[in-house]
Amino acid sequence: MGRKDVHTHSLPVDKYRKQIGTQNKKKTNVDVKGLKKNTEVKSSSPKLYQDIKVVLSGFAGMVLLSYLALYLWLVNKKVE
């Protein structure tokens, strides 16, 4: 009787764990493929466009900051 129990190939728990492992592997493979696509898109875009985005966003930020500073200065001037 003991020998039959030893020769059981897989327990239900082992089958369940194996199924969970394959599901997790499929999920991670999909995630890795998505990350690869994103990095390829980023690397394939020309550096010139990325530089233009940085310069324009910096310029827009400076304009907004100067507008805010002038607005606060004028509001304080009217109060006095």
Image: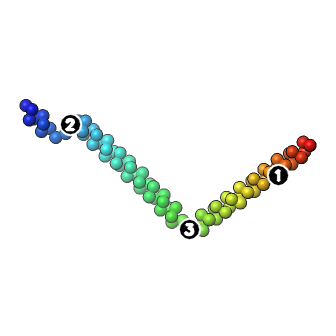
Q: Residue visible at 52% across and 61% down? A: 42
**Side (left or right) of 59 relative to 77:** left
Residue 2: percent from left, percent from top: 9, 32
Q: Which residue is mark 2?
A: 11
Q: Which amino acid, mark 2?
A: Leu
**Side (left or right) of 50 relative to 73:** left
Q: Earlier in the sequence, mark 2 or mark 1?
A: 2
- Secondary structure at badge 1 equals helix
Residue 44: percent from left, percent from top: 51, 66
Residue 8: percent from left, percent from top: 14, 38
Q: Which amino acid, mark 3?
A: Pro
Number of the front mark, 3 or 1: 1
Tell me the crowding category of disc 2: few under 14, some 14 to 19, or many 20 or more residues within 10 angstroms, Cα based: few
Residue 20: percent from left, percent from top: 32, 41
**Side (left or right) of 54 relative to 25:** right
Q: Which residue is mark 3?
A: 46
Q: Which residue is mark 1?
A: 70
Tell me the crowding category of disc 3: few under 14, some 14 to 19, or many 20 or more residues within 10 angstroms, Cα based: few
Q: Residue visible at 27% across and 42% down? A: 18
Q: Earlier in the sequence, mark 3 or mark 1?
A: 3
**Side (left or right) of 13 relative to 78:** left
